Image: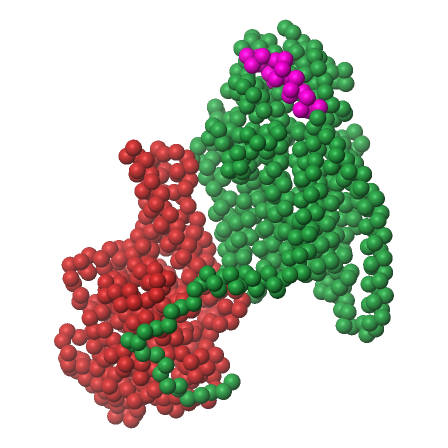
Amino acid sequence: MTALELAPLDISLDGPRPAPPDPRRGLVRRVAGWLLGHKVDVALVTVLTLVGALVHAIGMTGSPARFDDEGTYTAYAWAVQNWHTLGHYTYWYAHPPLGWLQISAWTWVTDGFDRAPYAVAAVRELMFVAKLVSIVLLYGLGRRLGFGRLGAAAAVAIFALSPLAVYFTRAALLDNIVTPWLLAAFFFAASPRRSVAAAVASAASFAVAVLTKETALLYLPALVLLLWQHTDRRNRRFTLGLFGATFTVLCAGYPLYAVLKNELLIGEGHVSLLWAVRWQLFERTGSGSIFDPGSTAHAVLHSWLVQDSWLPKLALAAVVPGLLIRRTRAVAAAFAIQVAQLLRGGYLPYPYVIAMIPFAALTVGGVLGWLWHPGGAGWMAVRWAAIPWAAVRRGWRACLVVACVAAVVVVGQAWRPALADLRTNDRDAGKAQALAWVRANVPTSAYVVVDDAYWVDLVRAGYPADHVIWFTKLDVDKDVKLPGSPPWKGIDYLLLDQQDDLSLHVQADGKPSKDTLRLFLTVGEALRHARPVARFGVGLDSVSIRQVVP
Amino acid sequence: MTQVMFMGGYLLLTVALLLVAITTLAWMMDSWRTPRAVGQMAFPEPDSPKLSFSLIVPARHEEAVLADTVRRLLRQDHPAVQVLVVVGDDDPGTAAVAERLAREDGRVTVVVDDSTPKNKPKALNRALPYCTGQITGVFDAEDEVAPALLRHVDTCFRVTGAHVVQGGVQLMNYRTGWWALRNTLEYFFWFASRLHFHARSGFIPLGGNTVFLRTDLLTLAGGWDVNCLAEDCELGIRLSVAGARVEVAYSPELATREETPPTLRGLVRQRTRWNQGYLQVLRKGEWKKLPRAKRLMARYLLAMPFMQALSGALVPLSVLTMVLLKAPVLFVLLTFLPLAPTLATLVVEVVGLAEFNRMFALEVRVRDYLKLVAGSVPYQLVLAFAAMRASVRELRGEHGWEKTEHVGAHRGELELEGVR
């Protein structure tokens, strides 16, 4: 650098100063410049998003058929919007409430319940939005992790086209709201500028994910690993320190709420956060081992594999190389954590797979991207520059192209009928008919015990909220009151689907089993004195209406 | 109705506190925002010196430390240094030390200040006409200046084309008292980080020493404002308005080492003076000539010591009222919001202490970290008290200069003996 003498003074203390440039024009230019600089990526992600949107949206109210869990979050959100309470029954800290607060914001702003064909369908619209956001973030994350366009696009294609993903990401579940927040947390953690602001954004996104569904907490080790990989020695202390502080402080809002309501500690006559945590962690009945053909866990796993066995196979094949390659390590770890949790046993919810899908897709896409352009695999680092013959590289890539085309053909063949089914099959038709039947044949004065998927629709149809009773709340919530003595005599109708029958241990002939009567006293007795009056739909999606005859 | 109004007012206050806490936090860690920014914290590598320097050292009742300070300044590895010691006509002790130094070394000039009452800006202005260097620097009588500083400043002026270069000042005696640790860390965040942000945004209150200005610019500006208790801040604002380019650089080995006030009372007095100075600059309104966006920043910044101190005092208060008060849960939850950045700030302070420890190769122990955390609320209360005291004094029209005394606690005991 040239060292000049002091230049003549170029300012005065009284002269007029030039006006600064308009910051807005600068912003427009910067955005335009960014878009131009990334035009291939922007085009690619636009096409991928469009394809993902079409595959997701066409048929999303018909398949899957609405089910109980979806109805529960729908009803919670409805209660937030209409009653300004955290649920349609006493909020007992089963999950943090941020998930259905987001749902209620959506249904309130878009007037969802008045517009959608049925209540759960209004919430599924938000899942559609979450899916689109997730696709963009997934692509961005793949690019930031250095997967290349091929790897990132492959990850998105898997996420958008796997029938397993399409089926589950359509459902109105908290897990589907978690996905974009979780991906955002990973996206920010992989910031190329390695800024403290990005770490704070990551922590905030992750806190929202955890406050949407606490199970997101499982991803913390993978996220911290990614953040560690993407921080610099020079500001790491600040980055990690503020990440921890932001995440902890935001999450503390949840126990703080419980403290303010005097519902943190276990006590007589009120719900409590600690009790709910204890129940979730230790007391909830496990689903058994996935390897035991008679267990619930095995059945749940089977229900996933029926949708699509290719994504699980590809992801399991990619997870070990994924852990070895530096750039895919964090996302492969996120997937591996979930697999380990699956093997461990314990309670396995039906939609557990949702959180695994984006990381499975990223692992597969990342490993593919590495095969195309290897490098930086830690101890097994292979650098193309070290191999002198360009021909080898061309040959290898030709093989890869052939393998990819073959994979697309084979997997495509497997996915096509399933995707067609998701597009055209109205699996919800039976549920809709059942609702129509109730509205036509059951007086609004009746007490109806229902699957939660119907709760909001029935209340909106004019049935008083205290007459429409979610079946899991009987004998549990002291605010649920029936006019009969014993209570089951007050029930007029039962509206339950095949899944509810299974979870109530109802026998194949529709009669309550010993377990039903032991575990679910009021519902059990009602079922014993009930006669079927109508049945709609087929298989697990079928729903039966029973009238109680005391 | 009254309750709704009370709650609305309270929420507004909460949002204000939240903003103050977040901006304070963002600015205090500005230099660590990206690895690239960390690289911009230090002085550029020095080349061969080309410029000449005049260093003003105002000294008032400083016979204990002055000789050592000036001798250190004369040991600078820079060929063109002039030292101007300003002594009062009523302070024969210090004057005698200054005269002796002038006899020892021809580069020292003694300037006598016969104004009444005396203050630092007046002393500086007295010396300004005698400054022959292209660059004028200011040091306090107790400053321990790194011998390689001027060579770095020389390069910095020429490489960056700056009009003003602000070097780092660092308190070192962090074990003197519980508040000394926090006071030390305040300096660290201020000079290592926050001033860099202000320089970048084109609006900067300068520091009281280790500040270097082009002599031609300083003469053009007419020197310092003799009526202001924060003459350094005031000059910074005036030069910011003129569009001066200010470069801030902080290298631990080049930071000027200073001491905290010897007592908590001294700290309160010093802080009162600074706060009152800020208030005077706010009232003087020079900043109103800035463009709109910077004007908002100026208003905010100059009123900041008060908001910050008050927010510190209000946080525990709000927690207390909210626990005792019966209000809707959502409302109470919202009032806790400012606590979030406040806790995050505490984490950043702990990290900052670790960084300070590393940069200065100190031996900070677990005990010191605990002291840092435990001292958070009391220190905020001390700052709040100083802020209120400043407001009251300014309203009453008391503009006296409460000078900070120096005992040389930042120097090793051996060195002090040599001085005596």
Residue visible at 68% across and 21% down? A433
Chain displayed in green: A
The red one among the chains is: B
Q: Residue at x 74, y 37 (%)?
A: A423
User: Horizontal and vertical percent for residue B231?
Assistant: 26, 71
- Asked if residue A53 is among those painted magenta in the image, a careful observer would answer no
> Given the current orientation, which residue lies at the most extreme top position?
A550
Is the C terminus of chain A in the top left, top right, bottom left or bottom right quadrant? top right
Image location (x, y in percent) of residue A332: 70, 52
Q: Please, is residue B96 above or below residue A270 in the view?
A: below
Residue A340 visible? The answer is: no
Q: Quadrant of residue A112?
A: top right
In this orientation, does residue B307 appear?
Answer: yes
Q: Is residue B189 left or right of residue A131?
A: left
Q: Residue B325, position in %: x, y?
A: 33, 35
The answer to which of B307 and B217 lies nearer the viewer is: B217
Span highlighted in magenta in the image? A430-449
Q: Is residue B214 above or below residue A434?
A: below
**Direction from residue B233 to residue B36 in the image, left or right:** right
In percent of width and height, residue B353 lies at 45, 62
* A229 is higher (above) or lower (below) than B157: above
Residue toward you, A493 or A26: A26
Q: Nearer the viewer, residue A112 or A176?
A: A112
Q: Quadrant of residue A338?
A: top right
At a point 48% along the width and 79% down the height, the residue shown is B44
